[in-house]
Image (cartoon, rainbow, N blue to C red):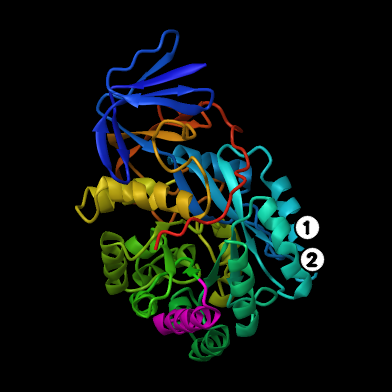
């Protein structure tokens, strides 16, 4: 079947052009003015932008913490993603401490069955030894080009020597390793200190994990990568100080990639003091306005490479586990549906970034860096993962109106100007006029080696 997206303005990372887009057999067949295609379904994009589908570089769907599971699985999470213009998510296939990478990959493939958007996996390594290293070539063959290590959490935390060895081994596969950067030993001590002061509510969460906890870990990761002689990336960067440490590493000639999330651009730690502060308990925590401002500058000046959501949703009933002790609150929040809307409204419309820069952050950079051939651009021969973006569409986010399975949104009350009206996944018209029309159209993206952009 052929589909013609007519009368729109095509936006890629390198600019805009008035053009029609012809979709055939799941791919973009032609891009140009005044196209005609006999028998094609016509989608009128007059007054709208035609964007490459977004790639969310950081989601946690169907995550089991042992004592509770995320409210969203791949079925509900992927529907929310698609309605926001995201056509691909990169989730985390997490190795069990006593398990293998192959087992983790198979488990996440099963979890992702029926996804409405495309998906791939970062491999989260929980144990790095000779057996794990021996699996890396098989992971490359299976389409895994990126890995994650945690510098925090019991059962997941990796020591510095393991991070060093893994960086070197992963680089040999032309893959990229990222890390969750916080100083675990220090923050555990600080959690105890905050509780000893009688602070048990959510306002204690940011006190126990101040900016320096992240900045120290970023600095340490940078030096470990320098010693390993490899590229590295930081997931969900949240602080001005962490950004400065990464910039220092780049000034030494290191290849460093940075991800941030909308919550660290738009929300501050004042949220923990209000009613329902547990909603905002996430790691890293929300920071100060000066951190938000620094990250916005990083986006505008090219220091930050892509934006994920760290979508890790819990209901308010689940959050209530920490009502008497903030450290027991499940860490995470929802956001997969609203990333593009928020960046458009508070970035593009506010004059902080351009629309092509938004496309670069949400589509081009992640598709290129993480090895998604033929994605991240509206161009002939590329996959027809597309969003028809209506800049005039507006609404207010509430706790109730997102499509995710969680009963709350950290962005409730945010006014939105610009959203995805129609979304195509692998050529299928999956979202029509802001409503999900064809669920379950996603497929696994078997990725190839990273294409470094720095």
Tell me residue 172's x, y (percent). Answer: 61, 67
Quarter of the rendering containing residue 123? bottom right
Find out whether residue 76 is within the magenta segment.
no
Whole-percent x, y for residue 266 in the image: 33, 61
Q: Position of residue 257 (x, y in %)?
A: 43, 66
> Neighbour class for label 1 at 10 Å: few (<14), some, many (≥20)?
some
Judged left or right of residue 32, residue 438 is right
Q: Which numbered tag is attached to residue 99?
A: 2
What secondary structure is the magenta-colored segment mainly?
A: helix
**Which residue bears the numbered disc 1?**
103
Residue located 30% across and 38% down the image:
11
Label 2 near label 1: C-beta < 8 Å?
A: yes
Residue 225 falls within the magenta-colored stretch: yes
Residue 152 located left or right of residue 208: right
Q: CA distance from mark 1 to mark 2?
A: 7 Å
Q: Is residue 342 left or right of residue 227?
A: left
Q: In this rendering, does residue 335 appear at all?
A: no
Q: Foreground: 68 or 242?
A: 242
Q: Measured from the top left, where is residue 408 in percent x and y?
A: 48, 53
Rendered view: 395 above or below 273:
above
In this view, the residue in front, 378 or 440, is 378
- Secondary structure beneath dot 2 equals loop
Q: Nearer the viewer, residue 431 or 386?
A: 386
- Chain part drawn in magenta: 209-230
Say if 169 sits above or below 416 in the image. Answer: below
Q: Secondary structure at mark 1?
A: helix
The residue at the far top in this view is 38
């Amino acid at each position: 079947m052929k589909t013609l997206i007519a009368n729109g303005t095509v936006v890629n990372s390198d600019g805009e052009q008035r053009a029609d887009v012809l979709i055939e057999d799941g791919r973009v067949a032609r891009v140009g003015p005044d196209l005609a295609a006999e028998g094609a379904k016509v989608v009128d994009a007059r007054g709208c932008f035609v964007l490459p589908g977004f790639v969310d570089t950081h989601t946690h769907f169907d995550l089991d913490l042992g004592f509770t599971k995320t409210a969203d699985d791949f079925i509900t999470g992927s529907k929310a993603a698609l309605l926001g213009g995201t056509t691909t998510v990169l989730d985390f296939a997490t190795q069990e401490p006593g398990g293998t990478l192959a087992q983790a990959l198979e488990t996440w493939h099963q979890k992702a069955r029926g996804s409405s958007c495309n998906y791939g996996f970062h491999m989260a390594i929980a144990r790095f030894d000779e057996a794990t290293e021996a699996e890396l070539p098989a992971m490359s063959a299976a389409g895994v080009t990126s890995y994650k290590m945690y510098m925090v959490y019991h059962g997941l935390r990796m020591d510095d020597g393991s991070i060093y060895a893994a960086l070197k081994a992963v680089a040999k596969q032309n893959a990229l390793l990222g890390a969750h950067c916080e100083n675990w030993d220090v923050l555990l001590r600080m959690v105890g200190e905050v509780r000893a002061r009688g602070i048990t509510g959510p306002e204690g969460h940011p006190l126990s994990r101040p900016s320096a906890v992240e900045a120290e870990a970023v600095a340490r990761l940078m030096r470990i990568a320098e010693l390993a002689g490899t590229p590295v990336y930081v997931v969900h960067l949240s602080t001005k100080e962490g950004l400065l440490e990464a910039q220092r590493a780049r000034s030494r000639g290191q290849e460093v990639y940075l991800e941030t999330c909308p919550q660290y651009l738009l929300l501050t730690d004042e949220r923990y003091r209000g009613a329902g502060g547990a909603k905002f308990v996430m790691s890293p925590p929300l920071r100060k306005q000066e951190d938000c401002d620094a990250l916005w500058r990083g986006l505008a000046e090219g220091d930050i490479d892509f934006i994920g959501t760290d979508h890790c949703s819990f209901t308010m009933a689940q959050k209530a586990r920490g009502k008497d002790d903030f450290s027991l609150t499940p860490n995470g929040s929802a956001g997969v549906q609203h990333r593009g809307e928020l960046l458009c409204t508070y970035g593009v419309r506010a004059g902080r970034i351009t629309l092509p820069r938004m496309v670069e952050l949400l589509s081009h950079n992640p598709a290129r860096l993480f090895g998604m051939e033929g994605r991240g651009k509206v161009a002939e021969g590329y996959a027809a993962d597309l969003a028809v973006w209506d800049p005039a569409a507006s609404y207010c986010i509430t706790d109730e109106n997102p499509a995710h399975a969680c009963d709350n949104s950290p962005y409730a009350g945010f006014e939105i100007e610009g959203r995805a009206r129609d979304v195509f996944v692998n050529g299928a018209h999956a979202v029509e006029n802001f409503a999900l029309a064809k669920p379950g159209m996603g497929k696994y993206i078997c990725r190839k080696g990273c294409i470094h952009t720095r």
